[in-house]
Image: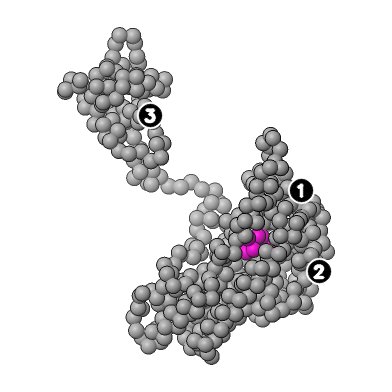
Amino acid sequence: MLNGQFPPFRSVQSMLAIPQPDGARTLVSRISGAIKDQIAEGVYPPGARLPSSRALAADLGVSRTTVTAAYEQLAAEGYLEARQGARPQVPKGLKVEPPVTRRDVEAIPARLSAFGRRLADLPRQHRPAADAPVADFRYGDLAASDFPMLMWKRAVDAAILRRPSRLQYGDPSGSPELRSALQGYLWRARGLRCDPDQIVVVNGSQQGLDLCVRLLLDPGEPAVIEDPCYAAARDVLLAAGARLVPRAVDREGMLTERLPPARLAYVTPSHQFPLGSVMSASRRQDLLAWARTCGAYVIEDDYDGEYRYDVAPIPTLQTLDGARNVIYLGTVSKTLSPALRLGYLVVPPALAPAFRAAKRLADRHTPGLEQEALADLIAGGAYERHVRRVRRRNGERRAALLTALRARFRDGVRVVGAEAGLHVVAWFTRFPMDREAMLVAAARAAGVGVYPVTPLYDPASASGRPDHPGLVLGYASLDGRDIARGVERLAAAIEGVAAGRPPRTG
């Protein structure tokens, strides 16, 4: 026993008393770690002897074997010298730095590359999680009930049974089966013609955007974007050091007259995000002619092209361009689940080798099991049946939202972007722009999650800024009853703002 003969092992006893998460540390490592801390703190200076394994085991209430193993570990790391028949000793020449505290670590400045500094300086665009017990109109979310659980389980089970007996890396471009299935699907659904070798499967559209920008843009070069624009696309360009050229959006999509020379253009022509306009045929031709003239590439983000309600399907830019200057970006995040992280690029043939190499360096390949399951669903027609089913359901949700907005706000709201997609933008025309934050706060206090449109505008551009508050209202994760209740609470909250009443919770 120690009984004052040796410095007390307070650190060891404390560590033994604290529950360890998930059993991550064994008893041996906890004891050796605590002894190591005491050596660093000078409790046991160089040349000092530690208790015998028998004495320390009795003091801690553990087996002697456990203490012996801890001592052996410390000896292997050079913290102790052990001789037969003698107590372990701290080596006389041992130099140990004091343990580093969290405060010490936080005081060390980050040493980042230019890319890292640009990334750290980006304005935070992440939408806060709303406490929305009544309804959360978060755009991008889908209803859990829409996910084809049984269909997906069967496809995954079948893919597991087909997998080869040996485990191996997959093709960086994506599985041949999925790329072949996507080729047929894109021709049927979007009129897009391509070879499987032009398709690169990515971990969601965000990775696709990142690969495009890294491969095609050098820091300081100009890139054309819509204004307002998908915030994550703008962030990717800013992090890459692009010089942004924002272009205003109207009912015919992005303005294309007198576009300056640039390396890239990022557009959402089939359902502009967030305003929902469809790029007109003349502007599509103008954009493609501009790209050919200045040697630019156009990234066509078709993020929700499967959802069209009041308009006929619009040909893709890639179809009109003949695969020369357009990179088509698609995803299953809006049809199956954002959690699957499955997207795809259709690139011009000349770019395919570079994209394959970049994908291999980024993450080697997209997980194969999900690819094979999706390939089965597409090849067998189940995926398109599912898309038709969820398009019908989302059409009903859209109708419920439009009906509720018209009933409660009448001419006090102007809704845009309802012809397609999974969200609308509601402009509240009776309020000045400086009331937007107040409207959002009042809605959230009433249990309704809403998201302002202002953060999606380029902060450096003064053209095309709205005169009235706007809310981006997603409806794909809600049922008709939740939509009606949410709009009712939203209307009450906005009426309170108009009357000067403080937000009412509950």
Note whether 186 is above or below 43 in the view shown: below
Q: Secondary structure at mark 3?
A: helix
Relative side of 126 to 40, left or right = right
Which residue carries the number 3 mark? 29
Whichever of labels 2 and 3 marks the residue nearer the N terminus, that label is 3
Q: Nearer the viewer, residue 131 or 453?
A: 131
Q: Residue at x 64, y 68 (%)?
A: 390
Q: Which quadrant of the figure has residue 472?
A: bottom right
In this orientation, which residue lies closer to the viewer: 474 or 376?
Answer: 376
Mark found first going from the N terminus, 1 or 2: 1
Q: Give how far across and how far down residue 37 sits, in percent.
A: 32, 31
At label 3, counting other C-alpha atoms closer than 10 Å, the crowd grade (few under 14, some 14-19, many 20 or more) is: some
Q: Alpha-carbon distance for marks 2 and 3? A: 64 Å
Q: Amino acid at mark 2?
A: Leu
- Locate residue 360, reporting x and y percent: 68, 44
Q: Is the C terminus in the top left, top right, bottom left or bottom right quadrant?
A: bottom left
Judge whether residue 294 can be spotted in this image. Answer: no
Q: Eyeballing the image, is 261 above or below 241?
A: below
Residue at the image point whose x is 67% and y is 81% from the top: 251
Q: CA distance from mark 1 to mark 3?
A: 47 Å
Q: From what the image shows, is residue 414 above or below residue 360? A: below
Mark carried by residue 320: 2
**Label 1 sits on what residue type?**
Pro
Viewport quadrant of the N terminus: top left
Label 1 sits on a secondary structure element that is helix
Q: Residue at x 67, y 36 (%)?
A: 167
Q: Residue at (41%, 73%) from the top-left corner?
A: 447
Q: Which mark is residue 176?
A: 1
3D distance between C-alphas at marks 1 and 2: 26 Å
> Which of the two discs, 1 and 3, labels the residue nearer the N terminus?
3
Left or right placement of residue 117 versus residue 222 in this view: left
Disc 2 versus disc 3: nearer the observer:
3
